[in-house]
Amino acid sequence: MPFGLPQPNAALPLFCFHHAGGNAASWREWIEPARKRNMQLCPIELPGRASRFAESARDDLTALLAELTAVLTPLCQRPYALLGHSLGALIAFELAQRLPAGTLQGVFVSGRRPPHRPTPPPLRHLMNDRQLTVELQGLEGTPPDVLQHAELLALFLPALRADFTLTERYRCDNALQGLDLPLQAFVGDNDAEVSVSSMKEWLRYGDSNSQLRSFPGGHFYLQQHREALLNAIASHLTPR
């Protein structure tokens, strides 16, 4: 983990998973505000980017989840929680099926269609580099300096394509279990990737106290509403 392992005697660890094409630094500015709310923010770096650039980006979700489960299980013997945005929401939810359930205090998903909703076409992981670059120009989240420099873009696209493969090839297992705790879902009210009504369907995967909250903004609304989101998360992380 690029920002260190959770400290055993410190606040509750909140493991965070980034969006497609992102990296652990997406959560860097959340660390100190989370600490003030008695949470230990632990951003997870997926292979193929930033501090793990030398590794191959993973495009097999089952294998990636097995890797993450092996790493995180020893760290989840104490109370912990999971947070993910976009692709990260899917990863967080699937890990909630695999990590220790008795110590799991909360699952927070943001900005992704629910598991039973397949990705509609066109599928970005099947686009060639030129098509994918054009697609990125219409999306939020890719730094302008990356889009404007062919060399940087060539370094960026393999991990991004792998991430799109993870989320777009995903098919919900009919045996997928709901969670025996509240699931909190968050979304931007103008998100072109997922509607508020679609995001509400996540609530079937938590208990009767699960909630949806929408915020003004698009797919990356959360950067403008960090404080409100952290307040919402902290308010749900009470002892069960």
Image (spheres, grey):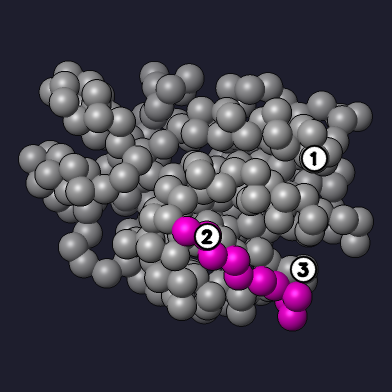
Mark 3 or mark 1, whichever is nearer to me: 1
Please state the horizontal and vertical placement of residue 135, each as a whole percent of the image. 17, 48
Q: Position of residue 197 (x, y in %)?
A: 46, 78
Between marks 2 and 1 in the image, the one whose residue lies nearer the viewer: 2
Give the left or right position of residue 99, taking residue 196 as reference.
right
The residue at the point 79 percent across, 58 percent down is: 236
> Seen from this angle, which residue lies furthest left?
130
- The quarter of the image holding the C terminus is bottom right
User: Given the image, on which type of amino acid does mark 1 rest?
Assistant: Arg
Sequence order check, earlier mark of 3 and 1: 1
Q: Residues within 10 Å of mark 2 (few under 14, many from 20)?
A: some
* Quarter containing the N terminus: top right
Check whether the beta carbons of the residues at disc 3 and disc 1 lie within 8 A of each other. no
Q: Tell me the residue that label 3 is attached to.
A: 181
**Disc 2 and disc 3: Cα gap in Å?**
23 Å
Q: Are marks 2 and 1 in contact (CB under 8 Å)?
A: no
Indicate yes or no whether the magenta region holds residue 68. Answer: no
| Residue nearest the viewer, comparing 230 with 66 | 230
> Against 191, is 27 above or below?
above
Q: Position of residue 195 (x, y in %)?
A: 40, 70
Residue labelled with disc 1: 37
Mark nearer the N terminus (2 vs 1): 1
Which residues make up the magenta segment? 207-216
